[in-house]
Image (cartoon, rainbow, N blue to C red):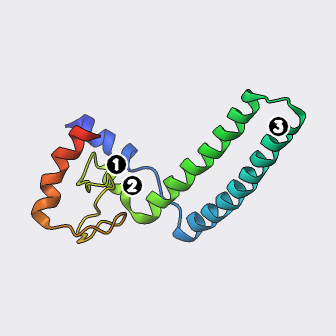
Amino acid sequence: MADQNTASPTAGAYDVPPTRELKRERKALLEVREERLRDLGGLALEMYKRDRFNAGLVVERCAELVAIEARVQEIDALLDGTARIRRGGGGAVCICGAPILLGARFCASCGRSLAPDSAASRQPGSDASG
């Protein structure tokens, strides 16, 4: 009992930044992503023209882009409120794999209609497939 009380303040210790800050960070990250994506294309073209392909450099630049995209997805999850569901250790999942927000009548990702009974029955099936 004492362990649970000690663990819960640390689990909830992360404060979500205000929405405007998250949106600002998301916009800046998307701009950086676009710039780096253009740079990657230019880099690949120059390596092709000079016949000096450096796979390590391409992989490094791609890893940077993937990290940026992962952070954008994190921010999207915070803005959508799905982080609360994931932190809670589960929740209903749509057939498309997107988490179903509490009280939702439609999937936010694919738009499928969600009946209360079918949303609960989809959860065990999604664990087997994913």
Tell me the quarter of the picture where residue 110 sits.
bottom left
Disc 2 to disc 1, how far (Cα)? 6 Å
Residue type pointed to by label 1: Arg
Residue 75, image x and y in percent?
52, 58
Residue type pointed to by label 2: Ala
Residue 89, image x and y in percent?
28, 45
The residue that appears at 50% across and 54% down in the rendered structure is: 73
The mark that comes first in sequence, 2 or 3, is 3
Disc 3, SS: helix
Disc 1, SS: helix
Disc number for residue 48: 3
| Residue corresponding to mark 2 | 83
Q: Are marks 2 and 1 in contact (CB under 8 Å)?
A: yes
Above or below: residue 106 compared with residue 74:
below
The residue that appears at 21% across and 38% down in the rendered structure is: 128
Disc 2, SS: helix
Q: Is residue 58 left or right of residue 120?
A: right
Q: Are marks 3 and 1 in contact (CB under 8 Å)?
A: no
Labels in figure, total: 3
Disc 3 to disc 1, how far (Cα)? 45 Å
Q: Residues within 10 Å of mark 1 (few under 14, many from 20)?
A: few
Query: Which of label 3 and label 1 is nearer to you?
Result: 3
Tell me the quarter of the picture where residue 101 sits.
bottom left
Observer-nearest of 55 and 64: 55
Residue type pointed to by label 3: Tyr
Residue 42, image x and y in percent?
81, 47
